[in-house]
Image: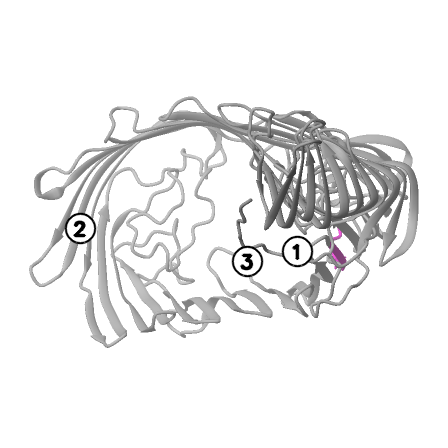
């Protein structure tokens, strides 16, 4: 006889449980379900013990009965075979019958990661089967399961009698026993590791120890199981536009690489809706198709109800696929039956749907080259009352190709860019454009730290257009060519000083450019540069138009000062102030309200980061009066338990955009470790009306999340009236 001593950890089990929920596994996808579902526990598969693996027995004392071939172990008993480990105070091993009997603080670790505790157990067949009395277990995701009796049929199947299950905590922070938030109790249950689910017969659902529902049959996944078909958590809403709303997603696990979710939606005022989502993961990339349709009460153009019904719906399909390391392609198709469908049924508040099919290539000439090419087709659907589908364009193709050389003499680079665009519409001007640009860039740094960058480009445009309205009132159809040579220079002179952990950067900047050539003839329609905007982000660009259809001509100069004061690692101020001067007036790009002035308005920004505070102010000041024509403020505070974000925009006497003044913000407050409150709103100060308001509470702990929200949307468009909406969602661990 020999004694082997080792240390043991102890696991304390403190409660007999209560409830799970009303649905089998899956994922959540309904719009208002903002809280994330609980992630599934990922279990690393382990090999199950076999008869070829030896049984290792250690204890404080081991006695062997030669006559009956029985081994008796007492004191700190450990029996291990493969990845199965049994601990007990006393254990006997009947060698002839391959049976182990254990008693006294019995615990057993399975290859799955589950740990079971019992007063007494009897196992055979290499610890794979047997009977356990008064079983208590902690599964690999910390869920708890107890039973008056357990019958372990084999390594994959265990029967439970008079059992209970919960993933919720069963003790207070002080270690006192308590009823879990929810649990499942059943007269009979089967843990099926092979099918990775727990099946219940004669089950009740308990909340805080009180039964609230009964079902003759129920199942939920074991920890680490793959997705399985079943019901998802529902969403309950109340809206004054569509009435009471109940969404019940149904999940179908078609295969490991694809699934389908169907969501029947009941609305008391607008009838039923069916939404769906199909997902598939290919070797090349993911595919996702979403859509819905409803046979809704018919309305006229003003949103007034009329006799009959009409079919309404939407589709949202997207995919992204790799062809190789250099090439990929994809698409995103978004369409709706009418302007108000998505907003009315709370699918989306977008006012413009963009559909795109594209292909692109990277570094396709060589391993280290700088090349990029993309070809795409675009279509648009406007969802406001002002949108006319007859004049909304379709663009196909839109092609861009870029190549940049390796550094050459004095580190200069040559760049080539090409653009091909064809734009069509049912009514109005159409254009086909071919554009090519050749450029040369030379960077230079002087000995005293001045940074100078020279850039020369030559652009050639060819347009084939039709139905272009000229100033004279006539319509032009034909071909237009344009040459756009441009030269620019950017000079910067950064000054830096340091004091311990603080530093100051001051950098005067001057940008000068001259653009000649064909300018902006009226025969070229303006499709991609409709709203020119002069601000701190483009003041030092030689061409501030967003697209190619319009160019800035003549000579000009931008000058300004930017800097940053670094106080500590997380505290600093940064700023920029600048102005532009042009030698010749060009009304195509207004730099101020005075179209005859050579000087622009002042533009710039000031930002402060003093954690947990952040604030940024962007502005445009009138050059003569210094009054603000554009003010944009974004501020925030983020330190537990409070997060606040505020945005403000004011436009006044802007040369392009209409006057407006809006403010929006949101607040989130953690009331404790589990409860949080949030508020969000937006108001049009110029019109004196609120656009949207919402507030609600959220709860999340180890086994349950739920969100409740009430909000008022003041949108008025056709059949959408200002609506008060209330919604509620819940998610239960291992039941999503």
For disc 3, the neighbor class at 10 Å (few under 14, some 14 to 19, many from 20) is: few
Q: Which residues are magenta?
A: 705-716
Question: In which quadrant of the rendered image does the N terminus lie?
Answer: top right
Type of colouring = one colour
Q: Is residue 731 left or right of residue 321?
A: right
Q: Which residue is mark 2?
A: 453
Q: Which residue is mark 3?
A: 658
Which secondary structure, mark 1?
Answer: loop
Q: Which residue is mark 1?
A: 11
Mark 1 and mark 2 lie on one chain; the one further toward the N terminus is 1
| Residue at the extreme left of the image, as rendered | 447
For discs 1 and 3, the disc positioned in front in the rendered view: 1
Q: Is residue 453 above or below residue 563?
A: above
Residue 179 visible in this rendered orientation of the protein? yes
Q: Is residue 83 above or below residue 433?
A: below
Proximity of marks 2 and 3: CB atoms separated by less than 8 Å? no
């Amino acid at each position: 006889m020999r004694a082997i001593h080792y240390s043991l950890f102890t696991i304390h089990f403190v409660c007999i449980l209560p409830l799970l929920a009303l649905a089998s596994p899956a994922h959540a996808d309904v719009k208002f379900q903002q809280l994330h579902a609980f992630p599934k526990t990922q279990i690393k598969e382990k090999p199950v013990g076999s008869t070829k693996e030896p049984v290792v027995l250690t204890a404080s004392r081991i006695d062997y009965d030669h006559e009956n071939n029985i081994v008796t172990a007492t004191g700190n008993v450990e029996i291990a075979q493969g990845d199965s480990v049994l601990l007990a105070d006393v254990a006997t091993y009947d060698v002839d019958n391959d049976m182990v009997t254990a008693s006294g603080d019995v615990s057993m670790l399975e290859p799955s990661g589950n740990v079971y505790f019992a007063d007494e157990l009897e196992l055979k067949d290499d610890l794979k089967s047997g009977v356990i009395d008064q079983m208590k277990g902690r599964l690999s995701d910390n869920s708890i399961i107890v039973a008056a009796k357990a019958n372990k049929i084999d390594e994959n199947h265990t029967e439970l009698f008079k059992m209970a299950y919960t993933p919720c905590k069963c003790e207070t922070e002080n270690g006192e026993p308590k009823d879990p938030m929810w649990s499942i109790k059943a007269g009979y249950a089967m843990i099926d590791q092979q099918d990775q689910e727990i099946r219940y017969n004669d089950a009740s659902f308990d909340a805080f120890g009180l039964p609230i529902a009964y079902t003759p049959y129920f199942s939920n996944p074991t920890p680490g199981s793959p997705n399985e078909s079943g019901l998802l958590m529902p969403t309950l809403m109340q809206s004054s536009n569509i009435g009471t709303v109940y969404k019940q997603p149904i999940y179908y696990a078609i295969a490991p690489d694809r699934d389908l979710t169907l969501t029947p939606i009941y609305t008391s005022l607008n009838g039923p809706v069916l939404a769906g989502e199909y997902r598939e993961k290919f070797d090349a990339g993911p595919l996702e198709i979403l859509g819905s349709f409803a046979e809704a009460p018919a309305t006229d153009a003003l949103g007034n109800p009329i006799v009959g019904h009409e079919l309404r719906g939407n589709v949202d399909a997207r995919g992204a696929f790799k062809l190789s390391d250099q090439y990929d392609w994809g698409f995103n198709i978004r369409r709706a039956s009418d302007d108000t469908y998505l907003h009315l049924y709370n699918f989306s508040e977008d006012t413009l749907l963009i559909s795109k099919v594209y292909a692109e290539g990277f570094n396709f000439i060589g391993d280290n080259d700088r090349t990029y090419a993309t070809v795409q087709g675009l279509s648009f659907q406007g969802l406001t009352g002002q949108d006319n589908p007859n004049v909304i364009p379709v663009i196909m193709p839109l092609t861009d190709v870029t190549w940049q050389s390796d550094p050459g003499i004095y580190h200069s680079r040559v760049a080539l860019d090409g653009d091909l665009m064809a734009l069509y519409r049912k009514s109005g001007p159409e254009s086909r454009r071919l554009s090519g640009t050749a450029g040369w860039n030379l960077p230079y740094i002087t000995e005293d730290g001045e940074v100078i960058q020279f850039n020369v480009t030559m652009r050639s445009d060819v347009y084939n257009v039709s139905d272009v309205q000229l100033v004279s009132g006539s319509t032009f159809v034909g071909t237009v060519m344009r040459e756009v040579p441009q030269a620019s220079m950017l000079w910067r002179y950064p000054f830096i000083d340091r004091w311990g952990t603080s530093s100051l950067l001051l950098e005067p900047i001057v940008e000068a450019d001259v653009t000649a050539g064909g300018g902006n003839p009226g025969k070229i329609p303006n499709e991609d540069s409709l709203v020119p905007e002069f601000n701190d982000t483009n003041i030092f660009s030689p061409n501030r138009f967003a697209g190619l259809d319009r160019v800035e001509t003549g000579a000009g100069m931008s000058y300004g000062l930017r800097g940053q004061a670094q106080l500590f690692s997380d505290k600093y101020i940064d700023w920029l102030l600048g102005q532009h001067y042009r030698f010749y007036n060009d009304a195509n790009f207004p730099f101020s309200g005075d179209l005859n002035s050579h000087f622009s308005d002042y533009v710039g920004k000031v930002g402060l980061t003093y954690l947990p505070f952040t604030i940024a102010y962007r502005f445009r000041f009138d050059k003569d009066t210094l009054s603000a024509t554009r003010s944009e403020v974004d501020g925030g505070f983020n330190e537990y338990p409070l997060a606040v974000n505020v945005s403000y925009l004011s436009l006044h006497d802007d040369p392009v955009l209409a006057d407006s003044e809006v403010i929006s913000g949101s607040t989130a407050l953690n009331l404790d470790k589990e409860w949080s409150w949030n508020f969000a709103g937006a108001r049009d100060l110029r019109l004196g009306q609120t656009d949207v308001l919402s507030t609600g509470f959220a709860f999340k702990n180890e086994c349950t999340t739920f969100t409740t929200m009430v909000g008022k949307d003041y949108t008025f468009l056709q059949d959408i009236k200002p609506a008060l909406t209330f919604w509620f969602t819940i998610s239960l661990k291992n039941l999503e």
